[in-house]
Structures are given as structure tokens and as C-alpha cells.
Image: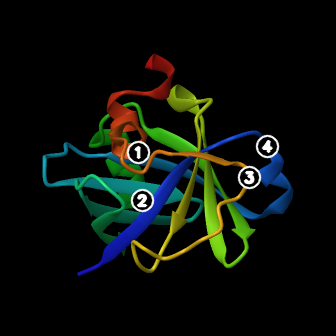
Amino acid sequence: MAKEIERKFLVIGDSWRKDVTASIHYIQGYFTTNKACSIRVRMSGESASLNIKSATLGITRTEYEYPIPCHDANEMLENLCNKPLLEKTRFHVQHHDHLWEVDVFSGDNAGLVVAEIELQSADEPFSKPDWAGADVSDDPRYYNVCLVKHPYKNW
């Protein structure tokens, strides 16, 4: 079983930008969800994936991800996913021994900037950068699937 262990933090300021090593633009959509899981399709450039993630609250969740043809992903995003679609640019920032992913949202979630760090275990120690603010790992409002239903612009 695939597990994702991830902590999520609000981002303070722009000082993280000086350490960006890569960026990726994502467009993603969610199908009808239930209390057990969310199902997402994501496009990034010339690649696409289908992702199934448990709806568990907290930093550890079950996650499966599979590559799919871009043509299929485009059709799913256009015809099957809930609207609005979620758009963000993900920036990779190395800080000490960990890769941080800073998501800068656009569209209905413009203004929201969140940093994520994936860990090998829930108790793995890590150095929190100065630009990482409040830990929002347990706040469902910041889950991407929830940002489709309740966009940041409406908070």
C-alpha cells in the first residue's frame, strides 16, 4: 500500500524564491468524492496522471498515482471533473536535507501560497525554513480537493 506522509505550511513572504531549483505548472480536477477518498486527474506539460488519495485527516494518507495519456486527461478535465479546475505552479526549494514544494495557486485560489514537505515517517525531524509559517497539515480547508469546493477567494 502506498503511503504519503506530508506536512503543509502557510508561506510567509517571498524569500523562498531565491532558492527555487525548478517549477511545474499544474492543472488538476477532481471527480465526485466520497468520505473514503478523492480521485484527481492532473496535467503538467506533456504528462498526466490519475491519483487516488484517502480522505484521512492528518499527515499520513494512502495514495496511488498512475500515468495516463494526456488526451484522456484533457477530456476528463473538460467533461468529467468538478469545476472550477484547480491551477497552481509548484516550485521546488531545497532546504537542508529536504525538498520543499511551494504551491502558488491561481484562479479562484489566487493569493494562497502553501509549502509541503514529504517525510519518510511521521516523526522524521526536519529543519523548518523561516518562510514556512503556520502548520496547516490538519486543516482540511488547505487540501486541494477542498479548494475546489470552497476556493480561497471565498474565505
User: Disc 4 marks which amino acid?
Assistant: Asp
Q: Is residue 64 above or below residue 9?
A: below
Residues at marks 2 and 4 touching, judged by CB atoms closer than 8 Å: no
Quarter of the image for the N terminus: give it: bottom left
Query: What residue does disc 1 label?
Result: 144
Residues at marks 3 and 1 touching, judged by CB atoms closer than 8 Å: no
Query: What residue does disc 2 label?
Result: 71
Q: Mark 2: which secondary structure?
A: helix
Residue at 72 percent of width and 70 percent of height: 94
**Position of residue 15 in the picture relative to residue 131 (left or right):** right
Residue 101 in the image, given as x and y percentages of width and height: 61, 60
User: Disc 2 marks which amino acid?
Assistant: His
Instruction: Give the Cα separation between the discs numbered 1 and 2.
Output: 23 Å
Q: Mark 1 vs mark 4: which is more N-terminal?
A: 4
Q: Picture quarter containing residue 4? A: bottom left
Residue 37 in the image, given as x and y percentages of width and height: 19, 55
Q: Residue lying farthest right?
A: 18
Q: Mark 3 vs mark 2: which is more N-terminal?
A: 2
Q: Mark 1 vs mark 2: which is more N-terminal?
A: 2
Query: What residue does disc 4 label?
Result: 14
Q: Mark 3 vs mark 1: which is more N-terminal?
A: 3
